[in-house]
Amino acid sequence: MKITCASLFIAAISGAQAFTAPATFNARTSTHLSVTQSDLDGAQDMIDGIIKEKNCGPVLVRLAWHDSGTHDCSISEEWPKSGGAIGSIRFDPEINHGANAGLAGAVKILEPVKEAFPDVSYADIFQMASARAIVYAGGPVIDMKYGRMDATSPEQCSPEGNLPDAEAGDEGKFGGPGGTASTEDSAVEWHLRKVFYRMGLGDEDIVSLSGAHTFGRAWADRSGLGAEKTKFTDGTPTKLADGSTTDVYAQGGSPWVEDWLVFDNSYFTTINDASTDEELLKLTSDKVIFQDAGFKPFATKFGESKEAFFESYAKSHKALSELGSKFENIE
């Protein structure tokens, strides 16, 4: 079910380890850029090369999602007050929010793209990198829209506390009182709904986007979750979408699935399988998609059909990538 903003709960988030030193990047004070299709094509080619060289796709997906996931569609004030995919994550304080630990490095990875194609907004670069990472990993092609305008100052950052928790805090509750409104709840399913409903997304989106955990790892020094390393992330070659293997990746962290650089529906076949390797991650927010009555039908369907998952995921990813965005025409 897609939730309209009139019926929304409003959001909050997890505490991960924050950077103590401020992160500073090229701010470019102009909101209005004259981006061309040639610029976008060039940026995409450059991003594809970075992903292939570094196998850094998962962190680029996380960067884009944490930029767009701040959106609160109940806020009717002038853009960009409602947050979203506006490139504000590059600014301190947002880049140093606890949930964004580790993402300053992802911004730096993409900085050469901005330098080469200065008329492409940061917001477009972040969202483009996420979509291209999914494709490179064997996932669906996302029907992306470009021409986003950028936030131009730290004052346009969203308050801390708008992203979801995977595990409960010390008091047994998910979320907290921060962000644009509280998402605190003792039940993870309702915490997730408060976060995603605030964005204007629904139950199917929650489940399909959760499926992106098939791609990547959790790191203890970023989210506070996962092991230092596992047998799947200790430098052992891991599978790529084309069937080859690579040991070119930063060692460490805990994956949800064995082939964590391949985007498929294996998350949905792994989470609910008690016989899977004990080193694979299964968080409370993962398990609930097979327990909650509203989530379970989607999780079951996606486990049975990769095609159904890809179709749903592509729609949800596109919707997430456009939250709060203000678009200009591409020349």
Image: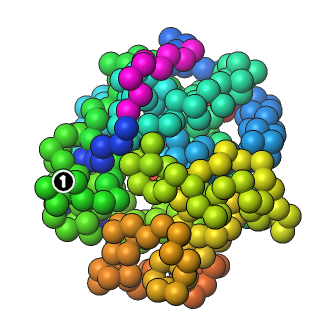
- 40 or 65: which is nearer to us? 65
| Horizontal and vertical percent position of residue 1 | 34, 72
Which corner quadrant holds the C terminus?
top right
The secondary structure that dominates the magenta segment is loop
Above-or-below relation of 179 to 185: above
Circle 1 residues within 10 Å: few <14, some 14–19, many ≥20:
few
Horizontal side of residue 331 vs 88, given as left or right: right
Amino acid identity at mark 1: Asp
Horizontal side of residue 101 vs 125, given as left or right: left
Question: What residue is rendered at 33% in x and 19% in y?
Answer: 155
Query: What is the secondary structure assignment of the residue under circle 1?
Result: loop
The picture quadrant where one finds residue 148 is top right
| Horizontal and vertical percent position of residue 256 | 53, 67
| Horizontal and vertical percent position of residue 261 | 69, 60
Question: What residue is rendered at 27% in x and 69% in y?
Answer: 189
Residue 211 visible, this orientation? no
